[in-house]
Amino acid sequence: MNRKKKTTGDEELKSEKEMQIKMVAFLSGHEQESQIDIAEKLGISQAQVSRHIGFAKSKGWLKSTTACELTPDELRKVENEIQQRLIPSDLEKNLQKLATRSGITAVRNIRVFNSGHTDTDEFGVFGRQAAGYVRDLILKARFVGITWGRTLFGLLEGLRALRIPSPWSEEPTLFFPLRGELQLGDPKEAAGDPIYKGKDLAELSPSNLVVSFNQMVNGDRNEPITLFAAPCFIPHVFKGKELATIKRFIQSTMTFKRIFGPGDTALIDGMDTILSAVGTIAHPSPIDGIMVAQSDESRSLIKHAVGDLGGIFIPKAKLNAAGMNYINSLEDRWPGMNLGHFRRCAKQAGESGMPGVILLNIGEKRAEAVYGCLKMGLVNELIIDQWLAKKLLTLVQEDINGSDSWPQLRN
């Protein structure tokens, strides 16, 4: 009996070591990562990485040219194993505990993908890593609402790199924008931002992303649904009757009514999936800080909010009633989706198994905004990078032993 147990233990140890060597081969040959980075990611020494590379070459898993030679099936297993090891061990458990305590929709899945380094195109790296997983989610969806931003554009580029011919499925997937067009800030400022360097900022808007996703997934089977003629928000220079008139005009356009109603056939009522990312307030960029850049609201926003979810501002924890009234008042200036749409999509997905709200983000500076969305039960699929995952674990560990619930936004 003891001998049998020892043999089983030896086999498990051998299997774990073989997987570790294959992960090193993958990260070195396929991802072109340095030995130092591989050691940090896998929690082993650089000397072990060097030995594993030598062994991988002797087995033919890694060529001297650093080309990874694992089979497609082995690559999938190795990628999945690496992805699972990037998730901090207590993150899933503590988020589940938080959801149970607060009575909110729990995150169904957490996926952590490598986003490279700050001197690389981390959005592009992350998009390529996450593309396969997100494609599987899109294949389950029927009605997909899209917000905006560099993260979603990076995902789009990653999905294109898969080179999957369209259409992806027999039935078309309907993509539609959840906001109108972005009013972009100073082009010179945008050109100096390394995140957006070399990008046409118009490509990052909801309607342009919808056009691209529709073409990639559906081919030429249906015309894209867009809101090019509608602005995403109404600046603060318009108040009172002017604000009401502009908002009523936007809501009267044909495409706006097709998406948001009124009526029983509004697309948003059947929406089973949302592709979105959060933006930050404290670190505004030409996209994340649209409202900050184009109004006199920057100080108030930084004081009261940690970020936004497609134009829905996420309040700071323990914000007082006056602060919440301010946050809720901003909704009138953002025609289109509201918090209730996000909540309903997340809740229904929790019951139906549809993808629901897919939140994609990278970088620890977005952790507070992402955590705010989690505490309000707005996320079904959380897809993040290793840096954001580590910061989220810190936030949830600080919070899990007892705190007030997140401030409640108006539906």
Image (cartoon, helix red, strand yellow):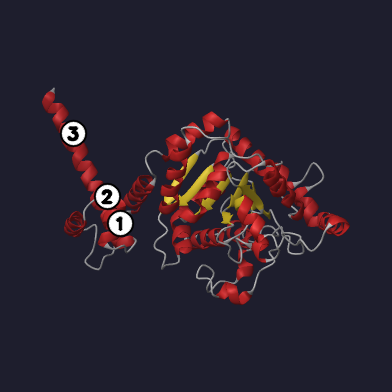
Q: Amino acid at mark 3?
A: Gly
Q: Earlier in the sequence, mark 1 or mark 3?
A: 3
Q: Are marks 1 and 3 in contact (CB under 8 Å)?
A: no
Residue under numbered circle 2: 43
Q: Secondary structure at mark 3?
A: helix
Q: Are marks 3 and 2 in contact (CB under 8 Å)?
A: no
Q: Closest to the observer: 356 or 172?
A: 356
The quadrant of the rendering that contains the N terminus is top left
The residue lying furthest to the left in this view is 3
The residue lying furthest to the top in this view is 1
Label 1 Cα crowd, 10 Å radius (few <14 / some 14-19 / many 20+): many
Q: Residue at x 35, y 53 (%)?
A: 72
Q: Closest to the observer: 285 or 130?
A: 285
Residue under numbered circle 3: 9
Q: Is residue 227 above or below residue 111?
A: below
Q: Amino acid at mark 1?
A: Phe
Cα–Cα gap, marks 1 and 3: 26 Å
The quadrant of the rendering that contains the C terminus is top right
Tell me: 152 left or right of 20: right
Q: Position of residue 28 (x, y in %)?
A: 28, 61
Q: Is residue 37 above or below residue 389?
A: below
Tell me: 160 left or right of 60: right
Q: Position of residue 186 (x, y in %)?
A: 64, 73
Residue under numbered circle 1: 26
Q: Secondary structure at mark 2?
A: loop
Q: Residue at x 59, y 72 (%)?
A: 200
The residue lying furthest to the bottom in this view is 188
